[in-house]
Amino acid sequence: MSKIKVGDFYYGAVLSMLFNNKVSPALVESDENRQIYDLTTNDGSCRLYIKYRASKIKNLTENYSSWQFGFACTELDDMKNYIDNGFNLSLALVCGMEGLAESEIALLNKSEVEELLNLEKSSITISRKKNERAYRISIGGGRNSAIKIKANQFEEIFLD
């Protein structure tokens, strides 16, 4: 019998979302820190880079959730190389919550990934207030100077 790894639940959530929308991904690369898929959309092909955090950062306020994602130098280099080589790269950040049911997926399109890479940070914090329609990736100086990521841009990235 095979054991299910914790990451399988989070990667599986992204795959389920793709399959349910008739998008068929092909696994390119996988390890315990991330998975990379190629998929074909209505606009052509896309490379999807997936990372997850199993739990959010403990915050003082109940209406605010944030997750910290770390990137190894090789991961940052890989993403830069994909973009330099003409891939339409998207990044899925699976933001886990206790019990899994409240977990969220933040999707970044190619220009947002490029903006993220230009920060040259090895870790980022992504956050969202309850009922807010955008995630924010801190770039220093508070929430007003953060990179805003639409909370639901799955269709824009994969189905348009």
Image: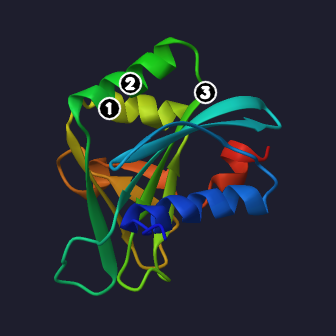
Return the mark for residue 88.
3
The residue sitting at the top extreme is 85
Q: Residue at x 27, y 27 (%)?
A: 74
Q: Quadrant of residue 41?
A: top right
Query: In the rendered structure, which amino acid carries the disc numbered 3?
Result: Asn
Q: Which residue is mark 2?
A: 78
Mark 3 or 2, nearer chain start: 2
SS assignment at label 2: helix
Q: Quadrant of residue 25?
A: top right
Q: Position of residue 114 (x, y in %)?
A: 43, 28
Tag in front: 1 or 3? 1
Q: Position of residue 146 (x, y in %)?
A: 31, 49
Q: Is residue 151 visible?
A: no
Q: Which residue is mark 1?
A: 75
Instruction: Determine the CA span between mark 1 and mark 2.
Output: 5 Å
Q: Residue at x 20, y 38 (%)?
A: 122
Instruction: Determine the CA span between mark 3 and mark 2.
Output: 13 Å
Question: What crowding class fits label 3: few (fewer than 14 Cα within 10 Å), some (14-19), or many (20 or more)?
Answer: some
Q: Position of residue 54 (x, y in %)?
A: 33, 68
Instruction: Determine the CA span between mark 1 and mark 3.
Output: 16 Å
Q: Is residue 126 visible?
A: yes
SS assignment at label 1: helix
Mark 1 or 3, nearer chain start: 1
SS assignment at label 3: loop
Query: In the rendered structure, which amino acid carries the disc numbered 2?
Result: Asp
Q: Nearer the viewer, residue 110 or 35?
A: 35
Q: Residue at x 63, y 54 (%)?
A: 153
Q: Are marks 1 and 2 in contact (CB under 8 Å)?
A: yes
Q: In the picture shown, does residue 89 fall above or below 97?
A: above
